[in-house]
Amino acid sequence: MIDIQVTGLSIEFEVGRKILDGLSFQVDQGERVGLLGRNGAGKTTLFKILTGELLPDEGEARTAPGKGVGLISQIPVYPPEYTVFDVLNTAFDHLRAMEKEMGELAEKMGEGDRAALSRYDTLTALFERQGGYETEMNLNKVCNGLDISPAMRKQLFTELSGGEKTRVNLARLILRETEILLLDEPTNHLDLYATEWLEDYLSHYKGTVLAISHDRWFLDRVVQRCVEIHDGKAELYSGNYSFYVEEKERRFQEKLKQYEKEQAKVAQLEEAADKMRLWAFMGNDKLYKRAINMERRIEKLQTTDRPTKERKLTMGFGEKEFRGDEVLTVKDLAMGFEGRTLFENVNLEVAGGERVALLGDNGTGKSTFVKILLGELEPAGGKLHFGPTVRIGYLPQLVTFDHPERNLVDTLLWDLNCTPQEARDTLAAFNFRGEDVFKLVSDLSGGERSRLKLCELMSKKINLLILDEPTNHLDVDSRDWIEEAVRAYEGNLLFVSHDRYFINEFAQRVWMLEKGTITDFKGTYQEFLDFQERQKVYAKNGTQPPVKEEPKKEKPKRPGGTKELEKQVAAAERAVAKAEEKQYELAQRAEEVSDNYLELQKVYEEQHVLEEEIAHLYTVWETLAAELEEMRQ
């Protein structure tokens, strides 16, 4: 049975520019399908047509008659006095109506009405089948999964943030047991725990799901196939996101080979046609006719357009040389607001080249921690120290500009002090081309503002990059751009993210902020997940993790490879040279105070300390030099 049918759908908002142009596909009952496409491709427009908010110019998009459709992006308006609990309970309106009718029927049954008895039996069975006796249990189960606390349920719905309203609306639709779910970026306002809960729920959901999402991990775990909207039409892929990526590349290569084959044949025929025309001028009419026929054949051959890909990022982060091992030291850091402690007794150290993911549920204090690092907030206690050569680049979660009234070119001219041509080249690297460069910053979407901020960041010399939800407002192509840049970046990285695809790609160390402290796990994200699973098993069984000697692990590859290691070897050499210079100065000082016993004794003590330091520095230098030699072989 078909639950969603889209046939020949076309719509345009500007004359001559069709958003959807003959879009056709179907979703069968029980399928979970991912809807892909660049920002502006028409995905949300399709949802609005499916829910009746928009009418298409041509074609139709319909859902199976009699089935309830729930749209996550659309938050209904409720009376101002409604609490979160009241909103959630609207999911059971149909059950309340059944209950009321059952009460009225019970009165009629007392009067001997047999028709009322039959109707009562039917309603009772339906009420039980639809969970009428389990509403409280189901409500608590869903609220716990989406982190809607008892205190939050008492709040007025109008006082919630946009993200909180989205979570409540998602819970309401789940409780309604809607048969068709349209999910428009459902994970955007969910933390990792709530996202995993939603994935688990959808894996057991018996209805039909059509999901717009840029969360690639979510798509891999939830959807069974993908529909990409490209140039207003549907391209179908019979697998999850990872399958889509591989299959799309295979199709591109196939089209490219077909195009190249056609072009080679066209070139061969054109050369032959030119020769025939030349010979025809010498009086051979037959050759002239053959040349004409050959040119017609060439026209028929040219049926394949050259396939194109999205332009890749053509610039990377500028990097300032980092000297020394110390990047960041955090000691006894504490922070709280209005009597509530976010975290305390936080002690951390970051060395050169490390890539750290700061994770945790919403509201635990991740962004606050980042603001303390940036000096935007003063901690309630403790201190932190950056290495002397650390230079920070920061991409905030909500990007703002001091002068939104400027256009894109002027923004870069002022902020980067560059030439107009340099500004346009930089913007072109981030897909701002043509008339787009004269857009006002105030007119940009959230994703476009993120891209513009990245333009600025990549033009600066930094060696510690801090990213707060860097992929939140970006489509898949834009996420590929930033990942390409981060992959080439060789400095230190600290990022807050709920994008598990991004975390899995870049985290080599995980800081989990929960229960007022930060758990420091040195390993990849997958290793961290495995560690968490083991901890759950030990807690469930009431056992302690076995104490055993850890097997020796191969040294992880250093971020940045040979280039970064060369920098560290050079830094170690400079540290040794500096210490030896001080050693020479102390020897000179010893000669000057040789007749003063007390001063001489102080110099001898300094020399002793310095000798130990030099021995340590030599050990560091020799280890790094040996590792560099090994990598070069």
Image: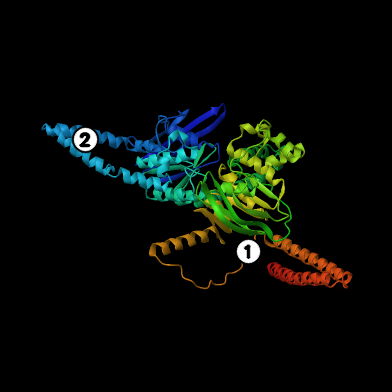
Instruction: Name the residue at 51% across, 36% down.
Output: 42
In the rendered structure, find residue 102 and report the number of the disc placed on it: 2
Observer-nearest residue: 324 or 54?
324
Label 1, on which residue? 557
Instruction: Name the residue at 56% across, 50% down.
Output: 249
Q: How many marks?
A: 2
- Eye-nearest disc, 2 or 1: 2
Q: Position of residue 246 (x, y in %)?
A: 53, 52
Check contact, mark 2 vs mark 1: CB within 8 A: no
Q: Is residue 205 above or below residue 511?
A: above
344 left or right, relative to 628: left
**What's the CA distance linking mark 2 and mark 1?**
69 Å
Q: Amino acid at mark 1?
A: Lys
Observer-nearest residue: 437 or 379?
379
Circle 2: element type: helix
Query: Can I make out residue 142 in this image?
Result: yes
